[in-house]
Image (cartoon, helix red, strand yellow):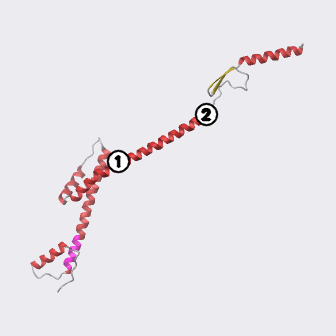
Amino acid sequence: MKSLLVGVFLIALCSVAHAQVTCQTNGNTTNCNGSLGSAISPEPVQDWAGMQARANLQNQQAALAQRQAQLARAQAEAIRQQTAVATRQPFLDEVAAASDDELRAAAAHWSSVKCGWLAPASCQDNVSFAEQAINAETQRRQEQQSDWYYSYRRCLSRFATPQSSDEASMISDQCKRDPSTFPPKSR
């Protein structure tokens, strides 16, 4: 009798324990309600491998989007620089063709330009470019003038002292036309 009672008790216990737990699977998640004891968690079973794969895919997509954004910024900067070069070349041509007076007037104008709050970066870039172009052309002309004057003086020194103003004018004219000609001293 005692063994029969133990058997009935075990059957009842198993059926009660079985009746207390119900599980439902929905996609990658399984939800269980109830409890079989402390060893079984009531939390839903998660697909950790799938979640990790999705996270990795999202990270890769974010990195790709970041690289594409960097490429787009680099392309935009290249286009901006090409546009700046294309629009600045006519200005450089004007500076090279300007007379000395026009160059001084342009230098005075660009040194007085004040950039407003609307486009301070591009305005300052333009002012800086103009000033650099004008200064470079002025320096080139001064160096060229200095070289020419040195050559002219050297040419004059190669001639003997002129005997008349006509002879001095002729020597001067010859040295002005081509100061690189250094005739041997005569007389």
Q: Secondary structure at mark 1?
A: helix
Residue at coordinates 35% horizontally, 47% vertically from top-left? 80
Where residue 180 appears, as percent x and y from the top left, is 23, 75
Look at the picture and state if 23 lies above or below 183: above
Q: Are marks 2 and 1 in contact (CB under 8 Å)?
A: no
Amino acid at the residue labelled 1: Arg
Is residue 155 or residue 11 the one in the foreground?
Answer: 11
Name the side, left or right, on which 184 lies relative to 21: left
Look at the picture and state if 168 lies above or below 90: below
Identify residue for label 2: 50
Quarter containing the C terminus: bottom left
Kindly give the residue lying farthest to the right in the view shown: 1
Is residue 82 or residue 163 the one in the foreground?
Answer: 82
Please report whichever mark, 2 or 1, sits nearer to the chain's N-terminal start: 2
Q: CA distance from mark 2 to mark 1?
A: 45 Å
Identify residue for label 1: 80
Q: How many marks?
A: 2
User: Which is the main secondary structure of the residues drawn in magenta?
Assistant: helix
Name the side, left or right, on which 5 lies relative to 90: right
Q: Alpha-carbon neighbours of circle 1 within 10 Å: few (<14), some, or many (≥20)?
A: few
Kindly give the residue lying farthest to the front in the view shown: 27
Q: Answer with the quarter of the image where residue 76 lies.
A: top left
Where residue 60 appears, as percent x and y from the top left, is 53, 40
Where residue 4 appears, as percent x and y from the top left, is 87, 14
Q: Secondary structure at mark 2?
A: helix
The magenta stretch is: 148-157
Name the side, left or right, on which 114 lies relative to 173: right
Residue at coordinates 28% horizontally, 54% vertically from top-left? 89
Q: Answer with the quarter of the image where residue 179 lies.
A: bottom left
Residue at coordinates 28% horizontally, 52% vertically from top-left? 88
